[in-house]
C-alpha cells in the first residue's frame, strides 16, 4: 500500500508537469489563439500535443482525486509540489536554461518542504477525534488512511 | 494601477483555488478510499459515487473560476507576479482552510512544509 501511495503522488507530480508542458507546446504551435475565435480553441484539441496534454491532465485529475480520498489536503498539496522543481530541471536539461542561485534556493526549500510533509502521517481523521477523549494522540492514527 | 489589478487577480485566484481544493477534498473524503471501492465494486461504481456528490461539481466550478481568473489575471498583470504569487499564497490559504473547514490536524510539520513550499515557489519566480 505504501508503494502505491507514493505511485499516486508521483502520478500527480509527473502528469501535471508533462500535461502543462505539452499543452503549452501545442498552444504555441497553434499560435496566438484569440478568445474571439472560440472555434479555433475547439479545434485545438486536434493538435496532437494539445490532445495528449489534455489526456495527461485528466490522468492528473484522476490521481489527485484518488489521493484526496485517502490523504489530507494539507498532505497532498505540499507532497506534490516537486512539479515546480521538475519544470525548472526540465528547462535546464532539455532547453539548457540557466538556473539562478535564487531559483536553486527555491528548489531546495520546496524539496525540504516535500520531505517534511511526506515523512509525517498522510491522514488525520479529525472528525473521529471529537468523539474521543482529548488526550488521545493524533500521530498514532493509521498513517495509511485505511478506515 | 496595473499592480493593483494584478493583486486583485491574485486574491481572486487564491480564493477560488482554495475553495475548489477544499470542496474537492471534502467530496473525496465522502466518497471514501477510491482504490478499495474500485476493487470491490468496479470503476463505474466509483464514478457514480463521485458524480452523486454535489460538492464535487461546486469544487470543479471553483477550479474553473480559478483557471479563468488566471487567464484574465495574465492579461492584466505580468506573468512573473501573478503565477508565483497566487500559487505560493494558495499553499498557505489551503493550510488555513483545511484546518477550519476540513478539521485537518495541521500540526507543526504541516505548517513548516506549507511555508517552505510557499517560500520556495515564490523564489522560483525571481
Image (cartoon, coloured by chain):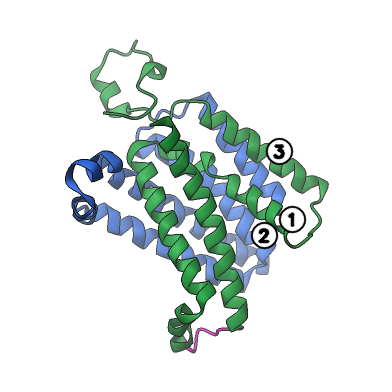
**Which of the two residues, A29 or A140, is positioned nearer the viewer here?**
A29
> Looking at the image, can residue B76 be seen?
yes
* Chain letter, blue: B
Q: Quadrant of residue B81?
A: bottom right
- Residue A34 in magenta stretch: yes
| Quadrant of the image containing the C terminus of chain A | top left
Give above or below for B11 relative to A144.
below
Q: Secondary structure at mark 2?
A: helix
Q: Is residue A103 left or right of residue A49?
A: right
Please report whichever mark, 3 or 1, sits nearer to the chain's N-terminal start: 1
* Residue A25 drawn at (x, y percent): 61, 72
Residue under numbered circle 2: B81
Query: Residue A100: x and y, percent?
Result: 81, 50
- The residue sitting at 49% across, 88% down in the picture is A36
- In reply to whether residue A143 is colored magenta, the answer given is no
Q: Residues within 10 Å of mark 1 (few under 14, many from 20)?
A: few
Instruction: Determine the colour of chain A.
Output: green
- Looking at the image, which residue is at 61% across and 43% down? B118
Give the overall secondary structure of the magenta segment.
Answer: loop
Q: Position of residue A140 (x, y in %)?
A: 38, 16
Magenta-drawn segment: A33-37
Q: Are marks 3 and 2 on the same chain?
A: no
Q: What chain is tagged by disc 1?
A: A
Write down the chain letter for disc 3: A
- SS of the residue under disc 3: helix
Q: At 68% from the left edge and 37% from the top edge, which residue is drawn?
A: A109
Residue indicated by mark 1: A93
Judging by the rendered image, the residue that carries numbered circle 3 is A108
Amino acid at each position: 500500500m505504501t508503494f502505491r501511495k507514493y505511485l499516486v503522488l508521483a502520478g500527480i507530480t509527473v502528469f501535471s508537469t508533462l500535461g502543462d508542458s505539452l499543452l503549452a507546446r501545442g498552444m504555441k504551435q497553434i499560435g496566438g489563439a484569440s478568445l474571439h475565435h472560440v472555434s479555433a480553441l475547439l479545434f485545438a484539441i486536434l493538435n496532437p500535443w494539445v490532445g495528449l496534454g489534455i489526456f495527461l491532465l485528466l490522468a492528473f485529475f484522476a490521481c489527485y482525486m484518488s489521493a484526496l480520498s485517502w490523504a489530507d489536503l494539507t498532505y497532498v498539496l505540499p507532497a506534490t509540489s516537486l512539479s515546480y522543481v521538475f519544470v525548472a530541471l526540465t528547462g535546464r536539461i532539455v532547453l539548457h536554461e540557466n538556473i539562478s542561485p535564487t531559483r536553486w534556493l527555491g528548489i531546495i526549500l520546496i524539496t525540504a518542504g516535500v520531505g517534511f510533509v511526506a515523512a509525517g502521517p498522510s491522514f488525520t481523521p479529525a472528525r473521529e477525534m471529537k468523539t474521543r477523549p482529548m488526550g488521545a494522540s493524533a500521530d498514532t492514527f493509521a498513517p495509511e488512511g485505511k478506515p | 494601477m496595473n499592480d493593483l489589478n494584478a493583486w486583485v487577480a491574485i486574491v481572486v485566484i487564491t480564493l477560488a483555488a482554495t475553495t475548489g481544493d477544499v470542496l474537492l477534498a471534502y467530496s473525496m473524503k465522502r466518497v471514501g478510499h477510491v482504490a478499495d471501492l474500485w476493487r470491490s465494486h468496479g470503476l463505474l461504481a466509483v464514478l457514480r459515487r463521485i458524480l452523486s456528490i454535489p460538492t464535487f461539481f461546486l469544487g470543479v466550478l471553483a477550479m474553473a473560476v480559478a483557471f479563468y481568473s488566471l487567464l484574465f489575471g495574465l492579461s492584466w498583470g505580468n506573468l512573473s507576479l501573478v503565477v508565483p504569487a497566487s500559487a505560493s499564497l494558495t499553499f498557505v490559504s489551503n493550510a488555513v482552510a483545511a484546518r477550519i473547514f476540513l478539521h485537518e490536524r495541521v500540526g507543526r510539520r504541516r505548517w513548516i512544509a506549507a511555508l517552505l513550499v510557499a517560500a520556495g515557489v515564490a523564489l522560483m519566480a525571481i
